[in-house]
Amino acid sequence: MLVLPGFSLLAEACATEPLTVAGQLAAAPLYNFIILSQAARPVASTSGQGLVSECALAQAPDDLDMLLVCASGAYVADKALRRHLVELATPGRLIVGVGGGAELLASTGLLDGYRATVPWSRLEEVRLAHPRIRLTYQPFEIDRERLTCGGGTAALDMMMTLIGRQHGSVLAEQVSAHFVLERVRMGKEPLPLGPPSSGVPASLTEALALMEANVEEPLTTAELAEHLGISRRQLERLFKKHLRAVPSRFYLDLRLQRARRLLRESERPAGEVAMMTGFSSAAHFSTAYRNHFGLTPREERLS
């Protein structure tokens, strides 16, 4: 874990604690990590509390499997730091950006061509500065050897997802229970929009509420617009501007996320789950599920 001045203690802990707990629960040394800094000195967090560094980045061990970068969104990296990060991004090594660390990785070019996310308040500015990155409004993204999150508790969900991929879903759920979380949140769940005062139109918030309330019998885009008292084109523009998606695609993603939770957390037959999430047939449900998640509902149950 590379920590840089002004980093968030919450984000750092959310990224590293799940790894420690996974090893404790598995009774095996699954992860061993060290704290890096630019100069092997204590680094002050955004709250003023310091974190002791064990090693300078330039002397990082050669056998690192993963490098996590935790920084504030306001941190400006010099050329030497950016060069070191690029040199460390060797094939097979996971490169992880936490909070402002994701934006720092963007500035090095290491996220070009990858799906990634950054703190929502910075996303549009980062998109303009780095158009080759496939930025999304997700809590976190895992795309091949690049992992990014917006910081805070999204780092917790990201690392528990990584633990699940590397050591199985059972251990990931145990880690989730240790932190008194209801479930492991998936990366394809959009970030909460917040109240209209945050700059999100009330009509968009109402549209999302209508979608949530009508999963079993989905509304068409035209019906949603009619309920809201706006035109279909206005609704589509709202979704494109704030969520980078068309309403129908966003609605489908929402229904499939609900289906995934039901498959993982209940014993309901897949056919019943299909009906509960607005799919007219098991075959249609299975195809949509496989296209979205890369596996069928049956395979989801067995994973």
Image (spheres, rainbow, N blue to C red):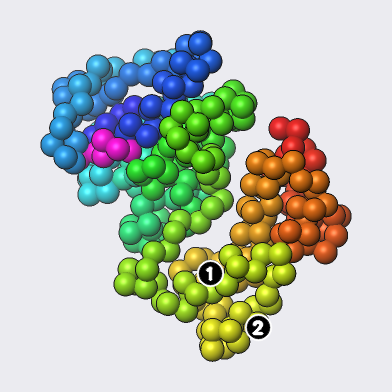
SS assignment at label 2: helix
Q: Which mark is residue 209?
A: 1
Q: Residue at x 49, y 66 (%)?
A: 243
Report the number of numbered marks: 2
Which residue position is annotated with label 2?
A: 222
Q: Name the quadrant of the C terminus.
A: top right
Q: Which of 129 and 2 is in front in this view?
A: 2
Amino acid type indicated by mark 2: Ala
Magenta highlight range: 5-11
Give the spatial CA distance, label 1 vs label 2. Answer: 16 Å
- Residue 246 position by quadrant: bottom right
Q: Nearer the viewer, residue 17 or 95?
A: 17
Task: Confirm whether residue 133 shows in the render.
Answer: no
- Say whether disc 1 or disc 2 marks the residue closer to the N-terminus: 1
| Residue 67 vertical position relative to residue 242 in the rendered view, above or below | above
Q: Nearer the viewer, residue 266 or 143?
A: 266
Report x, y in % for residue 144.
Answer: 57, 37
Q: Residue at x 32, y 72 (%)?
A: 197
SS assignment at label 1: helix
- Residue 215 position by quadrant: bottom right
Relative to residue 302, is residue 183 drawn left or right? left
Q: Residue at x 26, y 35 (%)?
A: 9
Q: Nearer the viewer, residue 94 or 210?
A: 210
Mark 2 and mark 1 in contact (Cβ < 8 Å)? Answer: no
For label 2, the crowd category at 10 Å Cα-Cα, with few meaning under 14, some 14 to 19 and many 20 or more, is some
Report x, y in % for residue 40.
Answer: 20, 20
Amino acid type indicated by mark 1: Ala
Relative to residue 66, is residue 245 drawn left or right? right
Residue 258 highlighted magenta (yes or no): no
